[in-house]
Each structure stands twice: as C-alpha cells, then as structure tokens.
Amino acid sequence: KKPIESNWPFVENLLKQSINSQTGILEEQLRMHLQCCLTLSHIWDANLPTVTILWEYYSKNLNSVFTIPWFGLKGLANISKTPMSMYELVKSCCGDLHSPDAYVSSNSYQIFLCILAQIMKKTVKTNGILPWKQIKGRIYSKFHQKRMRELTEA
C-alpha cells in the first residue's frame, strides 16, 4: 500500500499566515485549522516544523482562554480534578482515533496537544528519540522562572 504523499510545506505556510496576521486569529478559525492538521497528521508522514510553528504560537499565548463565546458552557475546557482524569485526557490525545467533532469538544490547545502526540509517535518510530528531545528542549526553554510567574490561572 503506497502512502499518501504529504504537502506539509503548504500547510505550514497557511498556518504561518493565519497565526502571524496582525489582527490575530479567532479561536474558531484556529480550531478548524488544527482539526485539519490533526487529520493530516494521521494520513501523512510526521512533520516537526508544523509542531514548532504551533508551539511558538501557543508559547506566546499561554495566558489566553481558548474559548468560543457563542459556544456557551460547551466552550469551557474541562479541568482534570484527579490524576486519573488527567491520565485519561492524555491517553485520549495519544490514541489513534480522534473525534471528528474535536472542534466542539476540545479547545485549540487540546487539539494542538493531540497533533503533538500523533507527530511525536510517528517521528519516534522512524527517527528515534532525538526529535522528541529537540521539541522538549523548545518547550522547556519557554518555562523559565520569570515566565512562570507571569502566567495566570486561566
């Protein structure tokens, strides 16, 4: 069975244009983009630059709320109150099956985490642990002591 040829450079350009616009991107638009990226991450090969682009966006917007006002209470993220519920959330992100309505049931950051998990699973299988160490280094570098103090509980 021949794999489907990917076109990640096109997706990367679209993401950059959307995220880097002067007016900003609406949460509902971002969720739609990420839902598409999540689907593509299942059928195309792994792509670390896409994860890097998204991480750069989220690292700058960690204090954002990621809700869609007209969703009402449905738009609020569920907070894990127990270690088991957090484990279940992580397990669902790492699974191979994702809900086609993630746009409604998850905020954009949660969809990003699913993309990260999917791409890292594929990358580790083909390239070993080095790509994970690179991404982990990028993530950890954003959480220095001063930055952690600036974050709110939102």
Image (cartoon, grey):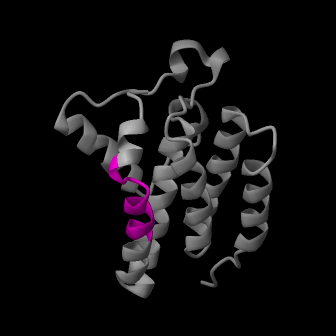
Residue 131 colored in magenta in the image = no
Image position, residue 81 (x, y; %): 23, 27
Residue 139 colored in magenta in the image = yes
Q: How many numbered circles does the render carry?
A: 0
Above or below — where is 74 with respect to 143? above
Is any part of residue 29 visible from this angle?
A: yes
Range of residues picked out in magenta: 135-145
Image position, residue 47 (x, y; %): 58, 73
Above or below — where is 123 with respect to 109? below
Task: Single out the residue that lies furthest toward the top.
Answer: 72
Q: Is residue 63 left or right of residue 57?
A: left
Dominant secondary structure, magenta: helix
Quadrant, the C terminus: top left
Residue beneath the point at 56% across and 31% down: 66
Image position, residue 137 (x, y; %): 39, 69
Q: Nearer the viewer, residue 147 or 29?
A: 147
Quadrant, the N terminus: bottom right
Q: Is residue 150 left or right of residue 83?
A: right
Above or below — where is 98 with respect to 103? below
Image position, residue 85 (x, y; %): 24, 35
Residue beneath the point at 37% across and 61% down: 140
Q: Is residue 1 left or right of residue 121?
A: right
Residue beneath the point at 60% across and 36% down: 103
Q: Nearer the viewer, residue 123 or 60?
A: 60
